[in-house]
Image (cartoon, rainbow, N blue to C red):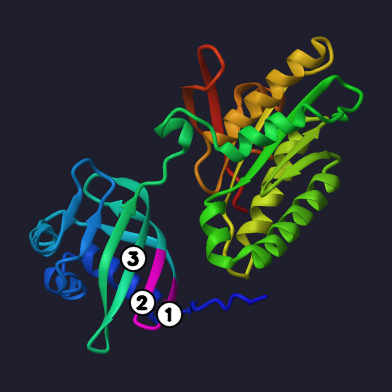
């Protein structure tokens, strides 16, 4: 039996070049931007806007013209990881772009593919995307959350004595790409450790971990405040992790009476919690209006970005809030 040998190694050099391209692009340095591209006719760029697909000289010409514009862009929180194997390499970045004149911030992700040309790494492909929640962008929830919600119906859920349960879903952002980059064995160890961290925090806040499926988890709590404290602690633990890949989560919480209506209403509460989680952006905790109302004016929690939106499979619009978690 042959053993697969991973040809890719971490490349701080390619990560640095990816960051350099972002900084020169944001700084409107047209010469530096175009010189980082390959001279090949195969060079391509795919952007997040309609029609942003350029090939060959069109890539170099469009960026040379665009970077000579007057709009100021400021990259923030840029993180990059690169890999290389022989004359080929790739990198990915996550960042926020701030436009001071418009007072707007937009989250972005970039993927770079490099070739080694005359001993110099050149960019042959860039894919730029704006990571919106699936529910907002395409009207469907994360398949991980869908599967987890369906699987939960097969288990006995311990609710406590009140009949009111706060249901919490957690989901790792970009888990498919991270699993492919790290390999099955390492990813399995990462997910096992991640679920162990969540299990400990859920228990510490008197909750019950109902199920984990892949990289997602479903838990229930006897109170909304306990669920939100657990969610904040989980986010803080994850953000403080020092290992690679660095995990980013989305968490959703919904609260409802799951006793009087028996199984059917239990399913509705669980399904809505999954939809709320799917509406969250990376590094966000989103809670339903019902969960927010449970804690009244408690000073322990801060909410913002109240948003009315449609949730798949549920009638009407639903008010959800972002729960701040950074200490």
Q: Is residue 297 above or below residue 172?
A: above
Figure check: 194 above or below 113 = above
Q: Which residue is drawn at 21% across and 74% down?
A: 36
Please identify the residue farthest to the right as the structure is shown. Answer: 161
Name the one closer to the observer, 312 or 124: 124
Q: Which mark is residue 112?
A: 3
Look at mark 1 in the image and give the residue it sits on. 85
Inspect the magenta stretch and tell me whether residue 87 lies in it.
yes
Percent from the top left, x then y, of residue 287?
61, 31
What secondary structure characterizes most of the magenta part?
strand
Of callouts 3 and 2, the N-terminal one? 2
Residue name at image x 58 percent, y 67 percent:
182
Q: Distance between the residues labelled 3 and 1?
A: 14 Å
Question: Is 163 left, or right, of 60 in this rendering?
Answer: right
- Number of residues whose C-alpha sits closer than 10 Å to that of mark 2, classed few (under 14), some (14–19) or many (20 or more): some
Q: Are marks 2 and 1 in contact (CB under 8 Å)?
A: yes
Residue 266 shows up from this direction = yes
Residue extent of the magenta highlight: 82-92
Mark 3 or 2: the one toward you: 2
Q: What element carries label 3?
A: strand
Q: Mark 2 points at which residue?
A: 88
Residue at the image position 31 percent from the left and 56 percent from the top = 127
Verify whether residue 35 appears in magenta: no
| Mark 3 vs mark 2, CA separation in Å | 11 Å
Residue 298 in sight from this viewpoint: no
Instruction: Using the numbered discs, state the Cα–Cα distance from disc 2 to disc 1 in whole angstroms.
Output: 5 Å
């Amino acid at each position: 039996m042959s053993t697969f040998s991973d040809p890719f190694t971490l490349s701080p050099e390619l990560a640095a070049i990816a960051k350099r391209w972002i900084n020169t692009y944001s700084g409107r340095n047209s010469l530096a931007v175009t010189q980082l591209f390959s001279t090949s006719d195969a060079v391509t760029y795919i952007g997040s806007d309609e029609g942003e697909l350029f090939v060959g000289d069109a890539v170099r010409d469009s960026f040379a013209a665009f970077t000579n514009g007057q709009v100021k862009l400021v990259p923030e929180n840029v993180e990059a990881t690169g890999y290389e194997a022989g004359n080929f390499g790739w990198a990915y970045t996550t960042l926020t772009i701030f436009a001071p004149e418009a007072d707007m911030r937009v989250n972005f992700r970039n993927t770079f593919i490099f070739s080694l040309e005359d001993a110099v790494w050149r960019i042959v492909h860039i894919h730029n995307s704006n990571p919106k929640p699936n529910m907002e962008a395409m009207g469907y929830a994360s398949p991980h959350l869908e599967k987890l919600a369906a699987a939960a119906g097969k288990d006995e859920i311990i609710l406590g004595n009140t009949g009111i349960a706060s249901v919490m879903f957690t989901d790792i952002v970009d888990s498919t790409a991270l699993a492919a980059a790290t390999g099955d064995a390492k990813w399995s160890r990462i997910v096992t450790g991640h679920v162990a961290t969540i299990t400990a925090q859920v228990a510490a806040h008197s909750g019950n971990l109902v199920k984990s499926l892949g990289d997602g988890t479903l838990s229930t709590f006897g109170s909304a405040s306990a669920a939100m404290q657990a969610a904040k602690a989980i986010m803080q633990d994850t953000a403080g992790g020092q290992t690679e890949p660095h995990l980013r989560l989305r968490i959703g919480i919904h609260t409802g009476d799951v006793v009087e209506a028996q199984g059917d209403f239990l399913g509705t509460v669980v399904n809505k919690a999954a939809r709320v989680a799917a509406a969250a952006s990376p590094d966000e905790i989103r809670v339903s209006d019902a969960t927010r109302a449970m804690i009244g004016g408690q000073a322990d929690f801060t909410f913002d970005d109240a948003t009315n939106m449609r949730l798949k499979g549920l009638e009407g619009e639903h008010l959800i809030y972002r729960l701040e978690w950074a200490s």
